[in-house]
Amino acid sequence: MELSKSEIKRYNRHIIMPEIGLEGQLKLKNAKVLVIGAGGLGCPVLQYLAAAGVGTIGICDFDFVDESNLQRQILFGTSDIGKSKAKIAGQKLQEQNPYIKFNVHDFKLDKSNALELFAQYDIIVDGSDNFPTRFLVNDACVITGKPLVFGAIYKFEGQVSVFNYQEGPSYRCLVPEQPDSSEMLSCSQIGVIGVLPGIIGAYQASEVIKIITGVGKVLNGKLLMIDTLGVSHSVIEFKRNEKTANITELSEYGNFCTDEFPEINQISADELKAKLAAKEDLFIVDIREPELFKQAHIHESVNYQIPDILDKPDLIPKDKTVVLVCQSGNNSMAVIDFLTEKHNYTNVYNLENGFNAWL
């Protein structure tokens, strides 16, 4: 596969650098990279990889654009609210670079599809914001033999590393066990400064380019930690642990990355509408951010925050049918799992596909 005259002109600033040159740019064109998540981290990763000329880019995300995303997910605009992130990202990135092939995977990543999907790509980039997905992505990368470029963000702080690269450590060498559901708080519950995903995502894209072209030092066995509030950068080194690195099969990862939730009661938007019309005695709890709740909500609902429920589970009554509502149905399932496992609730239902479905 060769570069056209237009591509040579487009990528001129790469090609004139001896570290990359024409050979390196051809490597980028022939590479296939899968990005998990088209959110805060995924947006800058996708934009920079597309601009750099990575020939085939996969976009895996099942979520829809929400107004609260626009503070940091710079690939989207107001007119995209309510639309599929993966599809909109693919369309906009195609306009950014028509020479790239974009594969849109607008479904939820889970243990039933991860291995087959990862096998189609050379490098996997994790732009997720929850532990179940991170562990699923890591294990699938180990099994399929794919390097994993990792990024994580928290308020003003971010982390970047590369796992499973040239027999280096995996994510489990750094974090051996998955935390339980009560610890699974994402940016939607704790907040994040809008520029941070751009900084961390740019570092992730840089690691991908270095892996493909073979230039520079890769963050293999190293964790880069960035504190934007304190203006500090630090790197810690960690080694491969054979006891945790050798994954041979996928396991169970929790509610954020599987379509099967046999232990959790579900109710569809249509069913909820019918029950409300029939004046059934329901206690509806909306666990989205107060700003989103004020903009639009189910009329009969109350607004509780996830940390409040975790600290005071008795906010949720046991003598009524309770329906939990979040934006897409994922956070509410994690809360229901917590209430069921830790406090023996049996009367709590999840609004399937969340407020998106209700809209």
Image (spheres, rainbow, N blue to C red):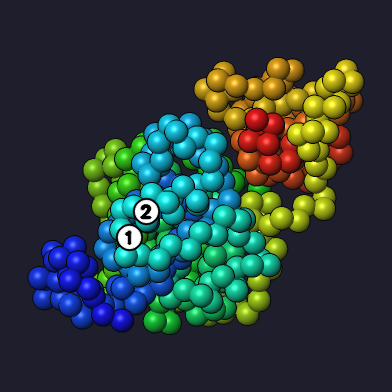
Residue 58 falls left or right of residue 332:
left
**Which amino acid, mark 2?**
Leu
Q: Is residue 157 above or below residue 94?
A: above
> Image quadrant for the C terminus?
top right
| The one of 244 and 196 positioned closer to us in this rendering | 196
**Number of marks in the image?**
2
Per the rendering, the mark at residue 107 is: none
Q: Position of residue 160 (x, y in %)?
A: 37, 58
The residue under the point 22% across, 73% down is: 4
Q: Residues within 10 Å of mark 1 (few under 14, many from 20)?
A: few
| The one of 83 and 196 positioned closer to us in this rendering | 83
Dots 1 and 2: beta carbons under 8 Å? no
| The one of 324 and 66 positioned closer to us in this rendering | 66
What secondary structure is marked by label 2? helix
Q: Position of residue 282 (x, y in %)?
A: 83, 23
**Which amino acid, mark 1?**
Pro
Residue where numbered disc 2 is placed? 93
Per the rendering, the mark at residue 98 is: 1
The residue under the point 24% across, 43% down is: 231
Viewer-side label of 1, 2 = 1
Q: Position of residue 135 (x, y in %)?
A: 57, 62
Residue 80 falls left or right of residue 244:
left
Residue 195 falls left or right of residue 119:
left
Identify the image quadrant of residue 124: bottom left
What secondary structure is marked by label 1? loop
